Image (spheres, grey):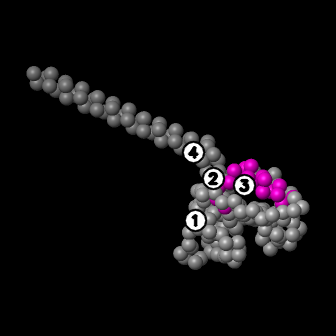
Amino acid sequence: MFLVSNTLIVQSESREQILRTNLKTIFILIISIVIVSLLLFKNFFFKSTYLLKSFGELSVDPEIAFTNNKPTFLEFYAEWCEVCKEMAPQVSAFKDEYEKDFNFVFLNVDNQKWGNYIEKFDVNGIPQVNLFDKKGNLISTLIGKQDEIKIRESIKNLEKEDKTYEEIINSEFSTIQENKNNEVSPRSHG
């Protein structure tokens, strides 16, 4: 009886050891798959965030934009804004398509140096896109998430001789958060 009991204990310990080894192997495999996936698909997962961060660097200075005789696409955004992140690829595509004929100005609402523009254009929700004709006249204000067709229509409206102001508000937008530190972060771009 003692020998059978000892054998069962040894078998039980051996099974537990094999089970632990298998679990460790599975765990390491899962972690490896996640890491490799993140590396391979990092552009897909983080593209919107990267685009938002690059907007300030790609921006034309607003003072130049309003005086160089080109229509202007002015977007107010924030890096924390989920709707801004969602629209970033679409806005980037518009920039690529129209940048020869338009000024593209991107102003981060968290950067206090743009406070006068935020106040002047009554920015309460983001993203907010203001479209100006060649003379610097505000023609369209688009607040919140906009589809490609609506933005294209507003851009085409800039080319008309008889332009009327339009304001388009979508309920999907982010409310501007107050910058509690009253500081301009060098990493806040634009």
What secondary structure is found at the residue carrying circle 1?
strand
Q: What's under tag 1, amino acid-wise?
A: Thr
Which amino acid, mark 4? Answer: Leu
Q: Which residue is mark 3?
A: 91
The disc placed on residue 175 is 1
Q: Of the residues under marks 3 and 2, which one precedes in the sequence?
A: 2
Relative to 42, is 90 on the left or the right? Answer: right
Q: Earlier in the sequence, mark 1 or mark 4?
A: 4
- Estimate how packed mark 4 is, as few (under 14), some (14 to 19) or many (20 or more) residues with alpha carbons within 10 Å: some
Res 71 visible:
no
**Could you tell whether 23 is left or right of 85 in the image?**
left
Q: CA distance from mark 3 to mark 2?
A: 10 Å
Which of the two discs, 4 and 3, sits closer to the camera? 3
- Vertical relation: 145 (above or below) 42: below
Task: Please provide percent x and percent y for residue 59.
Answer: 76, 64
Q: How would you rate the neighbour count of disc 2 (Cα within 10 Å): few for under 14, some for 14-19, many for 20 or more?
A: some
For label 2, the SS is helix
- Residue drawn at x 61%, y 42% as measured from the top left: 40
User: 69 or 12, which lies in front?
Assistant: 69
| On screen, residue 138 above or below 82 | below
Give the mark toward the camera: 1 or 4: 1
Q: Disc 2 marks which residue?
A: 86
Circle 1: is it few (<14), some (14-19), or many (20+) Cα within 10 Å?
A: few
Q: Which residue is mark 4?
A: 38
Gap in angstroms between the C-alphas marked 4 and 2: 19 Å
Image quadrant occupied by the N terminus: top left
| Nearest-to-viewer mark from 4 and 2 | 2
Q: CA distance from mark 4 to mark 3?
A: 25 Å
The span picked out in magenta is 143-159
Residue occupying the point 81% across, 64% down: 164
Frontmost of labels 3 and 1 is 1
Query: Which badge, 3 or 1, comes first in the chain's sequence?
Result: 3
